[in-house]
Amino acid sequence: MALTPDSDLTPPTAMTEPRHPKRKPAGTPSDGATASDGTPASDADALAFRAAVRDVRPLRVAPKVPPPPPVRKRRAARAAAPTDVELPGPLVAADVLPEETLSFHRSGVREQVLRRLRRGLLPIEAELDLHGHDQARARELLAEFLAAARARGNRCLRIIHGKGLRSGSRGAILKSAVNAWLRHHYDVLAFTSAKGIDGGTGAVYVLLRA
């Protein structure tokens, strides 16, 4: 039987899968896409973003300030501070005159503070009157008064010691004793004789440590 060129022995053509174009993710602008005004889409998005945040201003962050120590801790620190409770003993004789002005301050106290103390411009937060007490009792009362004032956080005090005008030959013995005791007390930064309205040379303004 003769074979023809178009016989069934011609090898079959290989099957191939149809090729589909790759799809871009949704929202991705196609190549050459433009906005309605003719601006490329990427530039239009950038311009829109800048316009949206144009009036936005960065928030100002306040500097962090460490909080002050609690009141209880400050009072505990004052209570733990050393105190010269053992004040000098009674004086035998007066070493200051009845009308003499008393003045004392430790190094480091500013002159402006001393000037305000002398002028009576600092508010008086507590006062003690030692009139009528002997030296032993006055010394005890003074130590207790200063300790209580320190615990309360008081800064400016007034202490009335008198001028000793009725002490006869002993002179201003209690005034002299207070002058010596205050100089030896740890918490006393300064003291000065008061203004006339507050007792004059018969009293002192006292400034305590903070």
Image (tube, rainbow, N blue to C red):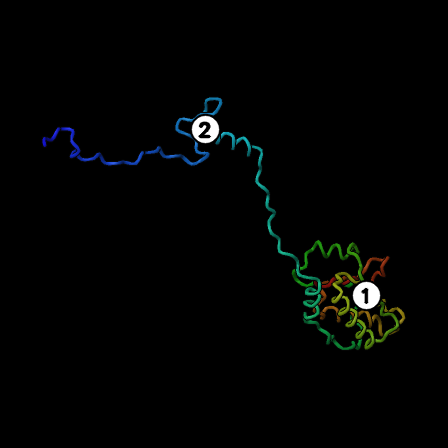
Q: Residue 121: percent from the left, percent from the top?
A: 78, 54
Find disc 1 in the rendering and name its residue: 159
| Residues at marks 1 and 2, CA–CA distance in whole angstroms | 86 Å
Front-lying residue, 126 or 34: 34
What number of labels is visible? 2
Q: Earlier in the sequence, mark 1 or mark 2?
A: 2
Category of crowding for the residue at label 2, using alpha-carbon neighbours closer than 10 angstroms: few (below 14), some (14–19), many (at least 20): some
Q: Residue furthest right?
A: 166
| Residue under the point 72% across and 66% down | 188
Category of crowding for the residue at label 1, using alpha-carbon neighbours closer than 10 angstroms: few (below 14), some (14–19), many (at least 20): many
Is residue 24 rendered to the left or right of residue 158?
left
Q: Residue 116: percent from the left, percent from the top?
A: 75, 54
Q: Secondary structure at mark 1?
A: strand
Quarter of the image for the C terminus: give it: bottom right
Q: Secondary structure at mark 2?
A: helix
| Residue under the point 18% across and 35% down | 11
At label 2, the amino acid type is Ala
Quarter of the image for the N terminus: give it: top left
Q: Quadrant of residue 87?
A: bottom right
Q: Quadrant of residue 159?
A: bottom right
Find disc 2 in the rendering and name its residue: 41
At label 1, the amino acid type is Ile
| Residue under the point 68% across and 61% down | 70
Front-lying residue, 17 or 100: 17
